[in-house]
Image: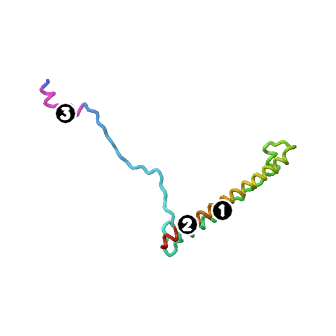
Amino acid sequence: ASQGYFRHYMLYKYAFTKKTEMSFSTVYTHTVSVPDNFLQPLGEAEDENQKLKKEEQEAMAKLEPVSTEVTAADLEAAGVPEDIREKVLAQVNEQLTAMKSNLDQKFQSTTKGMESKLQELEKKIRG
């Protein structure tokens, strides 16, 4: 019996060894069709900067203007007692106005700084 086992060792090994099978497949998780106007002729294409400006203007037009002042109705909804509502309203609106002017000043100074850096870089590029 032992001669048969040793003689056919590879056969026994094959018969009693677990096999690992791997199967590969491709699964598409989404199917997106390409829009008709995806590739346009270059003559009809827009300049990228103009396109971005146009999209930005459309997005800004969609934004609703936000009120920067608190009204008495807002304070009433917040549960502020009626006897101090006028004082709170004046103080909150004063603080909001101060914060808005402070942010506007910071924005303008930041914008000026970035514009000056941009001009310097353009000068270096031009030579």
Residue at the limit of the structure toward the top, as seen here: 1
Q: Which quarter of the image is occupied by the N terminus?
A: top left
Residue 75 to residue 9: above or below: below
Element under disc 1: helix
Q: Nearer the viewer, residue 50 or 110?
A: 110
Which residue carries the number 1 mark? Answer: 108
Q: Which residue is mark 2?
A: 118
The main secondary structure of the magenta stretch is helix
Which three-letter amino acid code belongs to the residue tagged 2?
Answer: Leu
Q: Do the residues bearing badges 3 and 2 touch, measured as CB atoms within 8 Å?
A: no
Residue 98 percent coordinates (x, y)? 74, 55
Residue at disc 3, secondary structure = helix
In the rendered view, would you say 41 is above or below 26? below
Could you tell which of marks 3 and 1 lies nearer the N-terminus? 3
Look at the numbered disc 2 and give the secondary structure of its residue: helix
Q: Which residues are magenta?
A: 3-15
Q: Position of residue 21 (x, y in %)?
A: 31, 40
Label 3 and label 2: CA atoms lie apart by 77 Å
Q: Which mark is residue 11?
A: 3
User: Mark 3, mark 1: which one is toward the viewer?
Assistant: 1
39 and 27: which one is in front?
A: 39
Q: Residue at 46% of width from left, 50% of height from top?
A: 29
Q: Give me the C-alpha separation between circle 3 and circle 1.
A: 84 Å
Q: Tag 3: residue type? A: Leu
Mark 2 neighbour density, 10 Å: few (under 14) some (14–19) many (20 or more) = few
